[in-house]
Image (cartoon, rainbow, N blue to C red):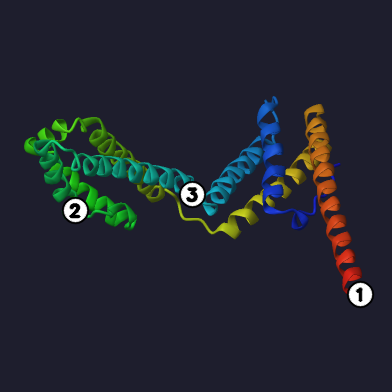
């Protein structure tokens, strides 16, 4: 017999973890010839959807990555810009003039373009790189021994744009789900799975069903303990707070 789990007491991460443990176990065992297989497959499918929805509701995995790539292209732009500016202070007049020519171009596209919004920055970077990529300007850059610095700026900007494109493609391919309905479907599927295992084990007793019940009961007991521990901790905290207020 499978012990009942009070799903309403579980936090979302606990609920998904509970279902995940059961799904992983059921996938790992031999189920050949068991009538419960379609129910298990439906439960596993709904669990996967719930995990996908849960992950999507958190900060997108791209958010942190984009922040890092954006910072990197900022740094590369500043490194190139500041190098060119430093070269403009050289005593060699010809050398300094080459730098001044490049500085005028940089200023025309935005001396502080790295402080703008990401879309604005991308547009300005595109126009800056386009102008600097001309034969005349790449020659000036080479004359300052700044080619590697320039290429870093170009490459780091390209990496940011590629990641932004990947994010757009990923988001456009996502299905639209009713989040609460997805979690409800998983709970119902879990309950149907438990009921199905019990019924089939009564109709056609099988050691494999016994093993399933034992594993599920073990999971249920462990997560019930987590709930009880959290409840006790919260109650104790409330009592302490009340005592402090009365003191």
Residue at image point 82% right, 49% down: 4
Q: Which callout, 3 or 1, points at the residue further toward the start of the chain?
A: 3
Q: Which callout, 1 or 2, points at the residue further toward the start of the chain?
A: 2
Q: Which callout, 2 or 3, points at the residue further toward the start of the chain?
A: 3
Quadrant of the image occupied by residue 38: top right
Residue at mark 1: 246
Residue at image point 70% right, 32% down: 25
Figure quadrant of the C terminus: bottom right
Closer to us: mark 3 or mark 1?
1
Element under disc 1: helix
Which mark identifies residue 107?
Answer: 2
The CA distance from mark 1 to mark 2 is: 66 Å
Check disc 1: other Cα within 10 Å, few if <14, some if 14-19, many if 20+: few
Residue 122 x/y as whole percent: 27, 50
Which mark identifies residue 60?
Answer: 3
Residue 58 x/y as whole percent: 55, 52
């Amino acid at each position: 017999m499978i012990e009942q789990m009070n799903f309403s007491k579980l936090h979302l991460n606990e609920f998904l973890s509970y279902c995940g443990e059961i799904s992983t176990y059921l996938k790992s065992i031999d189920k050949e010839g068991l009538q419960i297989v379609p129910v298990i497959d439906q439960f596993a499918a709904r669990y996967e959807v719930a995990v996908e929805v849960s992950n999507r509701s958190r900060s997108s995995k791209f958010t942190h990555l984009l922040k890092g790539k954006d910072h990197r292209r900022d740094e590369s732009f500043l490194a190139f810009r500041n190098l060119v500016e430093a070269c403009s202070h050289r005593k060699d007049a010809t050398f300094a003039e080459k730098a001044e020519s490049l500085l005028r171009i940089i200023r025309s596209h935005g001396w502080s373009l790295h402080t703008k919004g990401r879309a604005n920055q991308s547009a300005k970077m595109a126009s800056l790189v386009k102008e600097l990529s001309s034969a005349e300007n790449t020659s000036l850059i080479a004359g300052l021994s700044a080619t590697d610095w320039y290429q870093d700026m170009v490459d780091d900007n390209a990496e940011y744009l590629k990641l932004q494109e990947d994010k757009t493609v990923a988001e456009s391919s996502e299905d639209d789900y009713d989040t609460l309905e997805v979690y409800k479907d998983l709970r119902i599927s879990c309950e149907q799975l438990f009921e199905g295992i019990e019924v089939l084990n009564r109709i056609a007793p099988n050691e494999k069903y016994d093993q399933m019940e034992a594993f599920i009961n073990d999971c249920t007991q462990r997560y019930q303990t987590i709930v009880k521990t959290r409840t006790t901790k919260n109650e104790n905290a409330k009592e302490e707070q009340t005592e402090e207020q009365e003191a």
